[in-house]
């Protein structure tokens, strides 16, 4: 009897833990935005507790996005980028959100050309309606981009978070595995994540000084989940485990 009670308790603990995991993984579907912003597609990203929401007009080549992530600290930054060159960090056209000098949230554009200090500048995609929010510990950045006519709807996305902004400049991010694997392919038209590209070896080496270009940690894994938090038959692994555990309780 004692053994059975201990087993029940252990399974209950696992059940609660997995339930919390599923709740945390549902950021994508549970997020709502101000100003009646809505998007056609939403996917949880596999790293850095982030999600991407977007609408893509393939005729006009207009892309509207909302990127949601928890910065490494409340005074840090979050970034989302498209890299049209297909590399890791170098070449990324980034939107970076952080608290401005007056305390409000804002978004700035960065053309990441080198592994070193960054500076605000123009990007290859015409931006519009840039905005940002800070809510519930997460930063949200919004923007509209016009993509080139000949550009494939499957693009390389790079995302990142950092802990510090100094004098209006986002500073170096961590080089943990979560940061280095925050890269992948997204099919804007179909609303799915495609197979991730191979790692970019240069991206795993921190810059010798200054900042690491935010939103472009670089590396990537060919085994990165291809469809956000969903998996086999559209059911997440944690959700599947909860179902199995629920059935297990019936037979103890």
Image (spheres, rainbow, N blue to C red):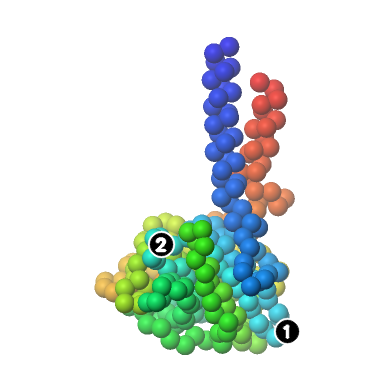
Depicted 5 relative to depicted 57: above or below: above
- Residue found at x 35% / y 67%: 164
Which quadrant does the N terminus fall into?
Answer: top right
Residue displayed at 47% across by 73% down: 105
Q: What's the distance in space between the residues labelled 2 and 1, CA to CA?
A: 39 Å
Q: Residues within 10 Å of mark 2 (few under 14, many from 20)?
A: some
Q: Is residue 34 above or below residue 15?
A: below
Can residue 142 be spotted in the picture? yes
Residue carrying label 2: 74
Residue furthest to the top in view is 1
Label drawn at residue 130: none
Label 1 environment density (alpha carbons within 10 Å; few <14, some 14–19, many ≥20): few
Q: Residue at x 66, y 41 (%)?
A: 240
Residue 28, x across and y down, in percent: 62, 59
Q: Residue at x 56, y 22 (%)?
A: 7
The location of residue 17, given as percent across then percent down, is: 54, 38
The residue that mark 1 highlights is: 59
Tag nearer the camera, 2 or 1 = 2
Picture layout, residue 86 above or below residue 150: above
Q: Nearer the viewer, residue 82 or 127?
A: 127
Q: Secondary structure at mark 2?
A: loop
**What percent of the width, then of the height, locates residue 157?**
54, 71
């Amino acid at each position: 009897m004692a053994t059975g009670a201990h087993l029940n308790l252990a399974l209950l603990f696992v059940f609660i833990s997995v339930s919390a995991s599923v709740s945390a993984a549902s950021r994508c579907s549970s997020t709502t935005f101000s100003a009646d912003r809505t998007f056609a597609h939403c996917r949880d990203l596999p790293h850095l507790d982030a999600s991407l929401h977007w609408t893509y007009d393939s005729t006009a080549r207009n892309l509207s996005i909302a990127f949601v992530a928890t910065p490494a600290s409340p005074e840090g930054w979050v970034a989302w980028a498209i890299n049209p060159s297909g590399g890791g960090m170098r070449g990324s056209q980034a939107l970076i959100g952080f608290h401005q000098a007056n305390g409000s949230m804002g978004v700035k554009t960065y053309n990441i050309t080198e592994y070193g200090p960054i500076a605000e500048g123009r990007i290859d995609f015409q931006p519009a309606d840039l905005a940002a929010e800070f809510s519930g510990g997460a930063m949200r950045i919004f923007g509209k981009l016009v993509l080139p006519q000949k550009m494939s709807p499957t693009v390389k996305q790079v995302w990142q978070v950092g802990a510090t902004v100094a004098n209006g400049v986002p500073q170096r991010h961590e080089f943990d595995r979560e940061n280095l694997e925050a890269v992948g392919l997204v099919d804007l038209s179909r609303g799915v994540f495609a197979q991730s590209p191979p790692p970019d070896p240069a991206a795993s080496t921190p810059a010798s000084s200054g900042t690491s270009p935010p939103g472009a940690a670089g590396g990537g894994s060919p085994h990165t989940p291809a469809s956000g938090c969903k998996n086999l038959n559209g059911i997440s692994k944690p959700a599947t485990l909860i179902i199995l555990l629920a059935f297990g309780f019936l037979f103890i």
